[in-house]
Image (spheres, rainbow, N blue to C red):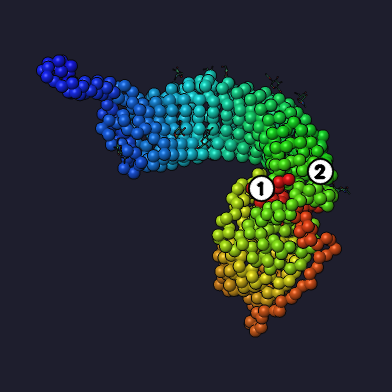
Amino acid sequence: MPLSTRTMALQPKHLTRSYVLLLFILFITSFISTTHAACSKMDQHSLFSSFDIASSSLNWTSQDCCRWEGITCDPAGRVTRLLLPSKRLKGVISPFLGNLTHLSHLNLSHNILYGHLEAGFFLSLSRLQILDLSYNLLSGELPLSPPPIYIRIVDLSSNQFNGTIPPSFLQRAWNLSNLNVSNNLLKGQIPSFNCSYSPFLRSLDFSHNDFSGIIPLGLGNCSKLELFRAGFNNLLGTLPSDIHKARALEEVSLPSNKLSGAIGENIANLTNLAILDLYSNQLSGTLPLHIGKLSRLKFIILHFNNLESFLPPSLMNCSSLTELNLGFNQLEGDLSVLNFSKLTQLIKLDLMSNHFTGPLPTSVYSCKSLIALRLSSNDLEGQIQHEILSLKSLSFLSLSFSRLTNVTGAMKILKDCERKVPVWLSKLKKMEVFDLSANRLTGSIPGWLGTLPSLYFINLDDNFISGEFPKELCRLKALRSEKAATQTDHGDFELPIYYRSVNVSASMLQYKYLSNMPPTISLRNNSLSGNIPRDIGQLQLLHRLDIGFNNFSGNIPHQISNLRNLEILDISGNHLFGEIPASLSNLNFLSSFSVAYNNLQGQIPLGTQLQGFNATAFEGNPGLCGSPLPNKCPKKSPGDSDTTKDREDVHDSGNGIPWLQISVSLGFIVGFWGVCGPLALSRSWRYTYFEFFSNIADRFVC
Ligand SMILES: *[C@@H]1O[C@H](CO)[C@@H](O)[C@H](O)[C@H]1NC(C)=O
Ligand SMILES: *[C@@H]1O[C@H](CO)[C@@H](O)[C@H](O)[C@H]1NC(C)=O
Ligand SMILES: *[C@@H]1O[C@H](CO)[C@@H](O)[C@H](O)[C@H]1NC(C)=O
Ligand SMILES: *[C@@H]1O[C@H](CO)[C@@H](O)[C@H](O)[C@H]1NC(C)=O
Ligand SMILES: *[C@@H]1O[C@H](CO)[C@@H](O)[C@H](O)[C@H]1NC(C)=O
Ligand SMILES: *[C@@H]1O[C@H](CO)[C@@H](O)[C@H](O)[C@H]1NC(C)=O
Ligand SMILES: *[C@@H]1O[C@H](CO)[C@@H](O)[C@H](O)[C@H]1NC(C)=O
Ligand SMILES: *[C@@H]1O[C@H](CO)[C@@H](O)[C@H](O)[C@H]1NC(C)=O
Ligand SMILES: *[C@@H]1O[C@H](CO)[C@@H](O)[C@H](O)[C@H]1NC(C)=O
Ligand SMILES: *[C@@H]1O[C@H](CO)[C@@H](O)[C@H](O)[C@H]1NC(C)=O
Ligand SMILES: *[C@@H]1O[C@H](CO)[C@@H](O)[C@H](O)[C@H]1NC(C)=O
Ligand SMILES: *[C@@H]1O[C@H](CO)[C@@H](O)[C@H](O)[C@H]1NC(C)=O
């Protein structure tokens, strides 16, 4: 204890001024340090025992734990706040933490905490108001003892908690406003809410768990509830019948469940709603007739449901809409009777795969903010109008699989987009994905495709293309060197792209990011002829090579075995002869393989993984023998593996306009042929073609 004022008064007069001053400072200091009580010994001990300080990034060195980083004390020196997010804390949540009985704020998010919470975890933490344990590795069941009555925020998201939420968990939480248990392994029913008990509830997030059963009633009494998320679970039944009473709701997100029944007219009472996200459910019925009352709606995301019948005209009154996604439903009706002109904020419009009819609605052209427009796989007819050029921001356009006509006209219109040749050329230079499959393209594959430095995905399946496999394609930079490949654009698509999965029938692959598209050359089902060029062996980054059902002849070049990344190799349905190169067994990643229906001969390479494929991969080659085919091989005859002289096919541009000529003269419009092209629909295709898209960043600027 420093000197008191009394001692100072007793000092002799010859004391210098400075000495008096010093004593005064000492006095003040002692006064401050007695008001700021040192950390309670018990709390200090609990803190030390609770965490493995050494491996964390904590600097807990001073004597007084109330001055430690992340700690706040009350005047009595009891710890009230423990805020240690992202401190690399590792280990279990220690029972010693329960000794911090004055704790009101506990934030340990973004650490490496594991283990489970004791059943009585909350019992001694009776003053807790805010609990954030998100982004750790906590597991086991939630504590049986419910959070205390003062609790306001509970965030247990992004852990590995399992089991059910105890029914009593929320029952005493008078002041609860936010609950987030998303991203765990919780199951059972979502607990019922009685907002007479929790009148301040604002936000509930149950998404990304394994919850099942129906959504219980009770939400309707939650007059402050703004957000309700429970997507990516196994929820059944209808939307809760009282949900429309929760007038404060701004977001209802329940995608990827098994919800059924109609959305219901009542939802139009939720006038604050901005997000209605119910995609990937089994919802049926019509869209609410009065949905137009929801003037704040920004996102209507309802794709992959069974919605049917006509779009209510009032939908066109939702003038705040930025994204309207109704794809993959059973919606119908003449689109052109709808007036889109109030949707001036609309950025994405996706009506793909419904039964809409009529001409393209010209009022769509007044949605000046549109970036992505997909109307493919409907029964639309008529022609693209000149006005499409007024959509200055449009970069994703998909109109395939409809009954649009006048391709020539469409190309002419789109050509007006850009007259300056160098610009379109540079645009093409950014092109990474080139998909013109399932059109009626004739002519040959233009060799200049091989000069596009970023191109790594080519799909021209199901056309009438003739001529040879252009040797230039073997020079595609993005398929040859790792360096060029990593320089490509890794942006996301404006709308996800869907492809039918090759391996799992009836399942759809969704690509959200360009970089996830597998490096591919797919020319299936055309009339290509000549040899498979040996240079193909240079496309070392290729994952998929499908040239099935063409007229290729000659041998299978052994250089194909240099394509060490190949997962799919399909050269079936051609006129290839000679033996199967034994080196093909070097292709370790092959998961799908077929050489069926050629004129291959000799023994299927013995003792290789090729024999692990189904016999159907080899059938239709009368000269081929050995496992897995049923026929045994006769003695090998010499000369079978002679290479045959390359056959030079005469270039045949067919009756149609030679494609090369068109694409050069019309510039990058060639891409859009795939979009607005002749669009007969056949279900027998191996891949379902949906759209063409070129480079991401700056795809289509008029
Ligand atoms: C830890 O904190 C003390 C003061 O509280 C400071 O002197 C010391 O430099 C800090 N150490 C590190 C490694 O930051
Ligand atoms: C602190 O908690 C531990 C473990 O729960 C317990 O054994 C100990 O008695 C507690 N200490 C005090 C002082 O309460
Ligand atoms: C916990 O801390 C993190 C990081 O500072 C912060 O983002 C989060 O909002 C905090 N949690 C609560 C419930 O305040
Ligand atoms: C709820 O919060 C209010 C205001 O923050 C507070 O006055 C009240 O005591 C709290 N009630 C409970 C039971 O925590
Ligand atoms: C809940 O937590 C997850 C992360 O764990 C976060 O992505 C989500 O936005 C949170 N929900 C709400 C409503 O804040
Ligand atoms: C929860 O996970 C733990 C291991 O983390 C396991 O022992 C327990 O059986 C699981 N409980 C349930 C109900 O799945
Ligand atoms: C909800 O709580 C109120 C008030 O305590 C009570 O009267 C009511 O019966 C409860 N409702 C349900 C469904 O439990
Ligand atoms: C809603 O609140 C009313 C009035 O407090 C109560 O009678 C009713 O039981 C509550 N409903 C539910 C489902 O909690
Ligand atoms: C709620 O919606 C229903 C059906 O649209 C309607 O009959 C009812 O009047 C609405 N209630 C309110 C308060 O707007
Ligand atoms: C759309 O809004 C206008 C103006 O509020 C209104 O007159 C019209 O009836 C609404 N249309 C529909 C179909 O609800
Ligand atoms: C095709 O479209 C062009 C451009 O819009 C137009 O000039 C031409 O008349 C159309 N042809 C037919 C047959 O409709
Ligand atoms: C090979 O494929 C055919 C047709 O897909 C199938 O019926 C047969 O069971 C398969 N055989 C083996 C051994 O997998």
Q: Earlier in the sequence, mark 2 or mark 1?
A: 2
How crowded pointer 2 is (Cα within 10 Å; few <14, some 14-19, many 20+) is rated as some
On residue 698, which mark appears?
1
Seen at 72% across and 41% down, the residue is 392
Helix, strand or loop at label 1? It is loop
Seen at 70% across and 37% down, the residue is 369
On residue 238, which mark appears?
none
| Residue 340 point in image, percent of width and height | 76, 34
Seen at 53% across and 20% down, the residue is 199
Ligand 10 resides in the quarter of the picture at: top right
- The quadrant in which residue 203 appears is top right
Q: Is residue 143 left or right of residue 572?
A: left
Q: Which residue is mark 2?
A: 386
| Residue 238 point in image, percent of width and height | 65, 31
Quadrant assignment for the C terminus: top right
Residue 236 seen in render: no
In-front residue for pair 315/119: 315
Q: Cα distance, mark 2 to mark 1?
A: 21 Å
Residue 462 seen in render: yes
| Residue 634 point in image, percent of width and height | 65, 80
| Residue 363 point in image, percent of width and height | 79, 36
Asked if the residue at label 2 sits under 8 Å from ligand 11, the reply is yes
Type of the residue with mark 2: His
Q: Tally the marks.
A: 2
Seen at 75% across and 74% down, the residue is 648
**153 relative to 467, above or below:** above
Helix, strand or loop at label 2? It is helix
Asked if the residue at label 1 sits under 8 Å from ligand 11, the reply is no
**178 relative to 334, above or below:** above
Type of the residue with mark 1: Asp
Quadrant assignment for the N terminus: top left
